[in-house]
Amino acid sequence: MSNNKEKLFAEFQAPTTQEWLDKIQVDLKGADFNKRLVWRTNEGFNVQPFYRREDVLKLKTPESLPGEYPFVRGNKKDNNVWYVRQNIMADDAQAANAKALDILNKGVDSLGFRIPGNKVSKEFIATLLNNIECECIEVNFRTCQRYTLELAEILKAYFESKGYDKEKLVGSIDFDPLEKIVMKGKDAAPMLSVAPQLVEVFKDYPQFRCVAVNSLALNNAGAYIVQELGYALAWGNEYMQQLTDAGIDADLAAKNIKFNMGISENYFMELAKFRAARMLWAQIVKQYEPKCDCACQMIVNATTSSYNQTLFDSYVNLLRSQTEAMSAALAGIHSMVVTPFDTPYEQPNDFSERIARNQQLLLKEESHFDKVVDPGAGSYYIEHLTDSLAVEAWKIFLQVEEDGGFLAAAKEGKVQDVINSTNEKRHADAAKRKEFLLGTNQFPNFTEKSEGKKPIEACQNCCGEESEFKAVKTTRLAADFEDLRIHTENTKVPVAFMLTIGNLAMRQARAQFSCNFLACAGYKVVDNLGFKTVEEGVDAALEAGADIVVICSSDDEYAEYAIPAFQYLNGRAMFVVAGAPACMDDLKAAGIENFIHVRCNVLETLKEYNAKLGI
């Protein structure tokens, strides 16, 4: 058998890269290779249509082994197990405890408690953690920054009273004053002095971390992948500098920093992001000369994004979060939270939380993603993405350092300006359908109603306090379309009638495009098989109570059909032409002013139509 294989492969000569390129160029028939096949990413680098072994040989990323510095291939050597985490709002200790005990029996092995600052007390923690074996799971806590040190001391006393093995306790306290500066514009810099005290409290707990980098907040504000990565590194480095300047040993400082990062929809790019993140963080920590390479490990809790979640067609959120969860799992993260699909419009209920848990359990127990270490290793494409992301993120990191570090850059609003600018660009791209949101700005459900659902957006300034610095504005990508659709639904739902005529293929394509276009605002769309004359089509539209008549035909035939249809309609409904025909100027001269086509700003066009219809 081996001899046959050798003969088989000997008969075929491996083509060179140039031969592949020559063949592609022939198939392109003169079209521009770079325009047709090269992907220009938002991350600042190009992705080629194919990669070969020679492209990877020059990279450093494949050289290390799993569990070894610089940890690009993960922190573990023999498995890819991660913690399945669910967060709980613990404003009532007894209720939160009951919920925690319940979900621990349903596949969760990591708990995240969010405790109001005024509830922090010994009695509260004792009730909250009653019957929870903290040695057997991961426990994480978040409270108001001002109460974090008090919470840490209470937790330490509680752990000691239970006689827990300090080596076995795994968890964290989410202390991150820099997040408040970036996201709220509040000057929390004085709180940075608490960080060394927190580290001192948990210095004997090697797997319990108490300083957090919450770049998840940037992800949920629309940051591009490379921006989240670059700023997360600078964010973490700021804490390293603050801690070591305060006299904390470099090993201890690094082992107390935890990264809470987001996962966006770009499947392979996100997988590569976490690989690049570990590699770059290891290199940063190495500059502080730790005694052990293990201090260079990056511990990441990954959370699926809420930025791309939608209120309409909300079950599509399950598809988004599932592919996001797959990216993070394959990338070798420490723990993961899957954001429930109904988060945009309600407090997640038992059903949505159950589904969110099961999304991770499916990856573990049915797909066995927890068995193989770094399955993406060696893939020419993934190795290229890892390297390219690392290069671009490192540029951002160096720029922040040139600006005086993350704290200085945040105080000057430089970080906030970049993220807000990206968010605005992404909203503008969504409005033009350059960025798709399935079920929102592309292929909406024509018959879906909001049924009283209202979007819940992140609070920009919960306390109503005046901000000292600029703040990041967090608005989901679908919010503009959802507001428009809900307004239409609550005011008046116009009827848009497709007057299909002429060339069969073109009229059907144009009708489908127009239905999708207008349904984005919640319009009732009426499609048709076709009419013999424009008069027949207009009469049918008026009989159907149409507020909008969309003529759908071929570009050549618009010169014949559009003006007669417009004149016969005679202002009894809004007249729209589907497309941008060569005769557009002639049609405009005849009084036709509404055209919808692929170059339209969908959101602004629909707002304009609403205004014309008095909606």
Image: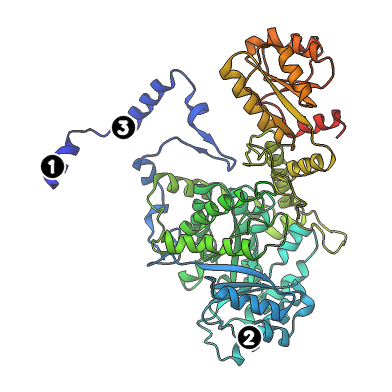
Amino acid under disc 3: Thr
The residue at which mark 1 appears reads as 4
The reply, left or right, for residue 58 in relation to residue 6 is right
Give the mark, 3 or 1, whose residue is nearer the N terminus.
1
Residue flagged by tag 1: what amino acid is it? Asn
Task: Name the spot of residue 164 as percent of width and height, x first.
Answer: 55, 88
As shown in the figure, which amino acid type bears the numbered disc 2? Answer: Asn
The crowd level at tag 2 (other Cα within 10 Å; few <14, some 14-19, many 20+) is: some
> How many numbered marks have been drawn onto this rendered protein structure?
3
Residue 208 visible in the displayed image: no
Q: Position of residue 469 (x, y in %)?
A: 81, 56
- The CA distance from mark 2 to mark 1 is 66 Å
Q: Residue at x 48, y 20 (%)?
A: 31
Q: Secondary structure at mark 2?
A: loop
Q: Residue 130's mark?
A: 2
Earlier-in-chain disc, 2 versus 1? 1
Local secondary structure at mark 3: loop
Residue at the image point whose x is 62% and y is 53% from the top:
228
Left/right of residue 289 with respect to residue 174 in the rendered view? left
